[in-house]
């Protein structure tokens, strides 16, 4: 049975590394020389079969099939295939890209799922696109995506704040959507992974498991449901092509107001772009940088760029009409440092006021006001 499983794997896995793993598994189970010889001959035969199957696979649209295949190879060994074509647990959660990334990291760390960084990136893109959050659903929790420092969350309900917001932000909860039974499984996971949970921080005085397993699943489903009209509408939306020139305005605490430009061009792959940007600060400093970006779920702009030689990440939400973006950028090494940013696409023949800098002046003092037009 073990050998059958290994043989199956070597047929399924196209990459050299996993074939090596599979044949190592076979070798351990066959101690005599003859058996080893036989198994090697069989393995060679399987590799032959493999090369002929991959030849026919390459005729189909590999790009479109890739994430589905990754799910099948890397996740299906543990996540059962459902009759509707999805996978247990995976298909009943919607989440923002960062939340999918976090779950897959956990699968690797705790469950030892074998997923390469490239496969992980492909899965995050695929899952965030097909099971993401609508812009309106993510809007109240963007502070956590944008890594805003010193943000005080609005806690809508004291019990929810205590039971689910004692260890991490409620934003982490609000950026995922599940039906009640999936919220219950998440509570099971918490207790399973952190058995001393009820003695943590503020939870000693609370019957955590009782509340998390009885009242919370329905409460969480009501607030953060899997099925929603907003997602149904958004999932039919087509991503805008963001390439072109954009005018940007914003403010970096400590550095002041700035204006500048963002030049976006399409690069290889769906929703992938190259980015060049320049910021001119009111106090005279002018800095620039470049990098690449991915658009998730049709509106979640994530760019990894440089700015003045330092690594910077842009986390912006694209407006539904694809004509403006708002959010924050931060230095990846010190994410509390960064700036607010608004970008508006430059369209020939149109103009609008984007910002007034400075935004206010001291009464009776004189300061020249500048109006930015885009
Ligand atoms: C070796 C077994 C194993 C593999 C491989 C595996 N998982 Fe899991 N997965 C689990 C187990 C066990 C749980 C439940 C415990 C938990 O949530 O950590 C789980 C839970 C999950 C959940 C629910 C998490 C939550 O927050 O409630 C998701 C989503 C998920 N896995 C996705 C994936 C994806 C995507 C892959 C493939 C990249 C994958 N898993 C591969 C074993 C696995
Ligand atoms: C004892 C502290 C603690 C409490 C209380 C707690 N969490 Fe968590 N939660 C964590 C930690 C730690 C992680 C990260 C687990 C990991 O990635 O290994 C986490 C992860 C999560 C995630 C991300 C799961 C994923 O797949 O990446 C969600 C969503 C979540 N918690 C929701 C909740 C909800 C809902 C409640 C209330 C029922 C809750 N948490 C209560 C500590 C807590």
Image: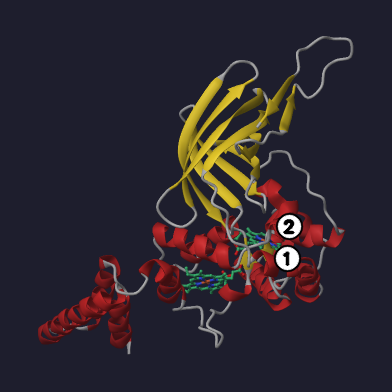
Left or right: 12 with respect to 49?
A: right
Q: Spatial distance from mark 1 to mark 2, Cα to Cα?
A: 7 Å
Residue 25 seen anywhere in this rendered image of the structure: no
Could you say which is closer to the camera, residue 27 or residue 288? 288
Name the residue furthest front: 349
Residue occupying the far right of the picture: 363
| Residue 192 place in picture, x, y as percent | 62, 71
Residue at x-position 30% and y-position 87%:
4
Answer with the quarter of the image where residue 84 lies.
bottom right
Q: Position of residue 89 (x, y in %)?
A: 59, 76
Please rate how many residues cluster around mark 2, counting C-alpha atoms within 10 Å: few if below 14, some from 14 to 19, many from 20. few
The correct choice, above or below, for 211 with respect to 294 in the image is: below
Mark with earlier residue (1, 2)? 2
| Residue at figure coordinates x 20%, y 78% from the top left | 47
Find numbered disc 2 in the image and state the secondary structure of the residue it sits on: helix
Q: Which mark is residue 230?
A: 1
For the residues labelled 1 and 2, say whether their Cβ atoms are less than 8 Å apart: yes
**Where is the C terminus found, in terms of image quarters?**
top right
Residue situated in front as seen by the camera: 166 or 154: 154
Q: Is residue 68 visible?
A: yes
> Mark 2 = which residue?
136
Residue, far bottom: 1
- 68 displayed left or right of 54: right
> In the rendering, at what x and y percent does residue 295 appear?
54, 53
Where 52 falls versus 369 (above or below)? below
Q: In the drawing, what numbered circle is on residue 361?
A: none
Above/below status of 5 relative to 201: below
219 sits to left or right of 278: right
Q: Nearer the viewer, residue 320 or 223?
A: 320
Direction from residue 352 to residue 335 in the image, left or right: left
């Amino acid at each position: 049975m073990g050998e059958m499983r290994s043989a199956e794997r070597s047929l399924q896995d196209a990459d050299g590394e996993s074939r090596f793993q599979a044949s190592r598994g076979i070798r351990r189970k066959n101690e005599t020389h003859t058996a080893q010889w036989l198994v090697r001959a069989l393995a060679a035969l399987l590799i032959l079969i493999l090369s002929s199957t991959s030849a026919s696979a390459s005729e189909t649209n590999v790009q479109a099939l890739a994430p589905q295949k990754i799910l099948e190879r890397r996740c299906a060994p543990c996540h059962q295939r459902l009759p509707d074509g999805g996978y247990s647990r995976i298909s009943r959660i919607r989440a923002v890209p960062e939340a999918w990334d976090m779950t897959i990291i956990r699968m690797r760390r705790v469950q030892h799922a074998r997923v390469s960084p490239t496969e992980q990136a492909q899965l995050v893109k695929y899952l965030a696109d097909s099971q993401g959050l609508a812009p309106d659903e993510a809007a109240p929790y963007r502070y956590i995506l944008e890594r805003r420092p010193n943000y005080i969350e609005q806690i809508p309900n004291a019990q929810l704040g205590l039971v689910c917001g004692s260890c991490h932000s409620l934003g982490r909860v609000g950026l995922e959507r599940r039906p009640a039974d999936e919220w219950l499984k998440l509570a099971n996971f918490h207790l399973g992974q952190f058995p001393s949970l009820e003695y943590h921080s503020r939870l000693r005085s609370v019957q955590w498991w009782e509340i998390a397993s009885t009242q919370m699943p329905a409460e969480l489903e009501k607030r953060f449901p899997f099925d929603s009209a907003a997602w149904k509408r958004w999932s039919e939306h087509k991503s805008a092509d963001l390439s072109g020139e954009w005018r940007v305005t914003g403010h970096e605490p400590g550095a002041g107001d700035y204006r500048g430009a963002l030049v976006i061009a399409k690069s290889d792959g769906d929703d992938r772009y190259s980015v060049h940007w320049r910021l001119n600060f009111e106090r005279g400093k002018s800095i620039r940088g470049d990098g690449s970006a991915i658009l998730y779920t049709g509106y979640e702009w994530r760019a990894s760029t440089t700015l003045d030689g330092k690594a910077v990440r842009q986390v912006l939400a694209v407006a539904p009409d694809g004509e403006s973006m708002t959010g924050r950028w931060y230095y990846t090494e010190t994410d509390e440092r960064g700036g607010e940013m608004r970008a508006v696409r430059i369209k020939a023949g149109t103009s609008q006021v984007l910002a007034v800098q400075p935004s206010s002046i001291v009464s009776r003092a004189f300061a020249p006001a500048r109006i930015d037009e885009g």
